[in-house]
Image (cartoon, rainbow, N blue to C red):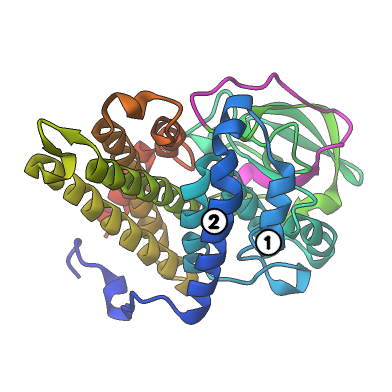
């Protein structure tokens, strides 16, 4: 088999039309984003407001456990279905949609890998978003090199005792459950274990809130463990399975953040097209200048390519395709790069107006910039893709 072949093409069935059910929850997500997220997004951003009440409204529509199984209150949807929802939510408020995507990733990890007792205890409240979740992998000394994490968990009877810290944790100080990777064994990936840590655990505290360029509608802080006691019953999977669980969560997280980039880019492009149709310069509409028409055409083409790559990755993940991790990395790399560039181009097409907070363009630019960094930097996405190609 040539090294450049794609085995998954043999199994691919292409149908780019949405089903009736998909159109229904796409419409529901779009209406919610237009009626609840979009009118409040600027205020949440300016005031660094974490909109818990609105998150629970989103959960009432089924968005709190999109691909969690139905027996614990989840919606039981496919990854492609979730991508459709996240695109719509992100067009209203990218920062808040991105938090919902992280919450969903953490809930799915519990649903997929935890025992029945932990699933049944935690997931009903997570799916309703009466409890909120964070995901904690990154540390001050280990970002892209996640297998080097140093937070230690020592067994003490029926508990683990944790010491260490996690960095850049979305939702930290406001969430109730932290799905956290800790070291229970030796160095490297095989020494890592996953715990679902309740926020009121003794010995758990938080650093100061980070002051960020974007994503201001969700708090971000360090999580600190000082002899923090966590019941062994809160372990997700077996000891030593944590790195594998973390990477499985990130495959889906990369699809989610790609979809959030697409939503922001679509909203920005639509705003740019409307501005071009109404704004005049040198005696004619901006829409009549061929150079600007070409710019808009390139934005639309990149947006469509990003969406198709994201749906392709979602289908691969749902199907258990052996190439799914590569497809997720490709979609995340392309969609987050394209999404940011489309938002930035839309701002440019607005001229000076795009730079004003009276318009949503500058917020979309700020909120999408971090998508190229989190869930694995886009440089790490290239590394994942290249390693798989060269290993064939």
Residue at screen point 61% across, 66% down: 67
Q: Is residue 120 above or below residue 267?
A: below
As measured in the structure, the alpha-carbon distance from the residue carrying label 2 to the one carrying label 1 is: 10 Å
Q: Please tell me whether mark 2 sits on a helix, a strand or a loop.
A: helix
Query: Which is nearer the eye, 236 or 375?
Result: 375
Q: Residue furthest left?
A: 290
> Which residue is denoted by mark 2 in the rendering?
248
Q: What stretch of residues is rendered in magenta?
A: 189-214
Identify the image quadrant of residue 336. top left
> N-terminal of the two: label 2 or label 1?
1
> Which residue is denoted by mark 1 in the rendering?
113
Contact flag, marks 2 and 1 (Cβ < 8 Å): yes
Say whether residue 316 is visible. yes
Residue 344 in percent (x, y) is at: 31, 34
Q: Please tell me whether mark 1 sits on a helix, a strand or a loop.
A: helix
Quarter that holds the C terminus: bottom left
Quarter that holds the N terminus: bottom left
Residue 267 in percent (x, y) is at: 39, 48
Query: Which is nearer the eye, 386 or 239?
Result: 386
In the image, taking residue 8 as reference, residue 61 lies left or right, namely right
Query: Which is nearer the eye, 113 or 15?
Result: 15
Q: Is residue 357 above or below residue 290?
A: above
Q: Is residue 262 magenta?
A: no
Say whether residue 383 is visible. no
């Amino acid at each position: 088999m040539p090294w450049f072949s794609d085995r998954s093409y043999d199994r691919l069935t292409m149908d780019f039309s949405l089903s009736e059910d998909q159109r229904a929850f796409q419409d529901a997500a779009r209406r919610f984003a237009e009626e609840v997220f979009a009118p409040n997004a600027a205020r949440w951003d300016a005031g660094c407001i974490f909109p818990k009440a609105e998150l629970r409204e989103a959960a009432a529509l089924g968005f709190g456990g999109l691909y969690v199984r139905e027996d614990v209150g989840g919606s039981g949807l496919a990854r492609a279905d979730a991508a459709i929802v996240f695109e719509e939510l992100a067009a209203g408020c990218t920062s808040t949609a991105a938090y919902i995507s992280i919450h969903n990733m953490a809930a799915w990890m519990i649903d997929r890998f935890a025992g029945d007792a932990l699933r049944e205890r935690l997931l009903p409240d997570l799916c309703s978003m009466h409890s909120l979740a964070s995901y904690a992998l990154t540390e001050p000394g280990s970002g892209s090199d996640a297998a080097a994490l140093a937070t230690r968990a020592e067994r003490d009877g029926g508990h683990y005792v944790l010491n260490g810290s996690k960095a850049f944790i979305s939702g930290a100080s406001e969430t109730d459950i932290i799905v956290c990777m800790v070291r229970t064994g030796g160095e490297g990936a095989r020494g890592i274990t996953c715990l679902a840590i309740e926020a009121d655990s003794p010995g758990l505290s938080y650093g100061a809130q980070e002051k960020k360029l974007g994503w201001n509608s969700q708090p971000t802080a360090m999580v600190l463990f000082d002899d923090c006691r966590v019941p062994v019953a809160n372990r997700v999977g077996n000891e030593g399975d944590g790195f594998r669980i973390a990477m499985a969560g990130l495959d889906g997280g990369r699809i989610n953040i790609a979809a959030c980039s697409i939503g922001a880019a679509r909203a920005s492009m639509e705003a740019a097209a409307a501005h071009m149709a109404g704004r005049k310069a040198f005696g004619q509409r901006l829409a009549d200048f061929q150079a600007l028409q070409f710019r808009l055409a390139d934005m639309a083409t990149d947006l469509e390519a990003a969406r198709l790559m994201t749906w392709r990755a979602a289908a691969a993940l749902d199907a258990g395709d052996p190439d799914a991790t590569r497809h997720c990395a490709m979609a995340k790399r392309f969609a987050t790069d394209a999404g940011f560039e489309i938002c930035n181009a839309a701002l440019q097409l607005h001229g000076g107006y795009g730079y004003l907070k009276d318009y949503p363009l500058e917020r979309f630019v700020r909120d999408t910039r971090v998508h190229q960094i989190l869930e694995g930097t886009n440089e790490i996405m290239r590394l994942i893709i290249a390693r798989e190609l060269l290993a064939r």
